[in-house]
Amino acid sequence: MSIPKKILVIRFSSLGDVIYTTPVVRCIKQQLPHCEVHFITKPAFKYIYEGNPYVDKLLLLKEKLGDTIKEIKSEGYDCIIDLHSNLRTRIIKLATGIKSYTYNKQTIQKWLSLKLRKQLVPPVHLVDRYLKAAAPLGVVNDNRPIDYFIKNQHHLSDLLPPSHQQGYVAFIIGAAHFTKRMPNEKIVSLCKKLPYPVVLLGGNDVKDNGTFVAESCGPGVYNACGKTNLDESVFLVSKANVIIGFDTGLTHIAEAFNKPIASIWGSTVPELLGVQPYKIDHSLVAGVKLSCRPCSKYGLAQCPKGHFNCMHLIQEDAIVSFCKKYFNPYTSS
């Protein structure tokens, strides 16, 4: 098999799925060093690959698919690694006629797993599933975490009060859907049990939630939700001693820094999508076994049963114990 000179890797969305393509791109670039590697995604997720040294060129999906196809044809790729595997990528591959290797999405198995609430999809991480698409090129897993490159220089003194600059737990309280988030009262209860400063992270959508939690807990909890941009939030995650987070993009990005992570799962389960913490030294996956869980692949606006026990019954003490075990060996300096 001839080694391609120019490769296009495709993954359009979403944040977590795109971030887990970074080991694939790294492995291709490092193991095929003479190959030019390009990546294409939606404009909303370009920041994941901006500054990534393993990508020679970043392409963005255009509003008209025909314009994207025209651009791809003009680049003269030898092959495509399709890590999205949907209708648009099938059209791209058909229209360009470029040799391609495609990620097996296991759509039917995932659907049946959700409907029957049985683990019909092997609990193989998404990164390893992606890498199978690149295996025909001789690419193998380097067994390193995901990549994320902070764009700018930041300082804790500019982002946090003095009380939180010598070490803290970063608690990522944002998530796209209600059933991925702990109720505010549950977050308050957990924060009060932590004997460390806590920094709450999230966007404007959870700014009020953060305000409620911080006011309920006192000065030990600092609400940074809506006050920091994404790059600053990632920087704060990278400097945290321990991280607590829900099933959301920033929690997945945090894996790039190999810090202890306690990930909390409500209506979704990591095994179904293969997005449990990847190649980090210390992690805790907190979730409750229930007959109604999982109720969704990606989260819902409300609990279908009304009780929301998948979050209410989360064992706070296990999360606190994890934080106590791994807080001290790590510093925020």
Image (cartoon, rainbow, N blue to C red):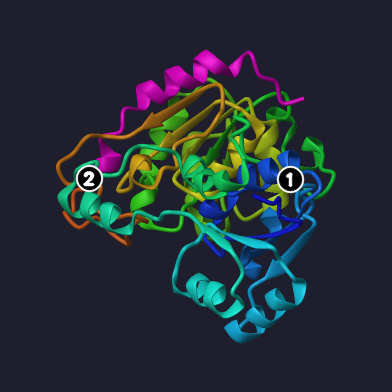
Name the foreground residue: 236 vs 296.
296
Residue 325 on the magenta span: yes
Q: Could you tell which of marks 1 and 2 lies nearer the N-terminus?
A: 1
Name the foreground residue: 200 vs 208.
200
Q: Quadrant of the C terminus?
A: top right
Residue 209 is situated, as x and y percent measured from the top left of the image, at 47, 51
**Residue at screen point 65% across, 79% down:** 68
Q: Is residue 238 left or right of residue 252?
A: right
Q: Which mark is residue 29?
A: 1
Label 1 secondary element: helix
Q: Give amino acid for label 2.
A: Arg
Q: Which mark is residue 149?
A: none
Residue 116 is situated, as x and y percent measured from the top left of the image, at 15, 50
Residue named by callout 2: 293
Label 2 secondary element: loop
Above or below, 207 relative to 186: below
Disc 1 crowd rating (10 Å Cα; few below 14, some 14-19, many 20+) is many
Above or below, 274 relative to 58: above
Q: Give amino acid for label 1.
A: Lys
Q: Which residues are magenta?
A: 309-333
Res 321 seen here: yes
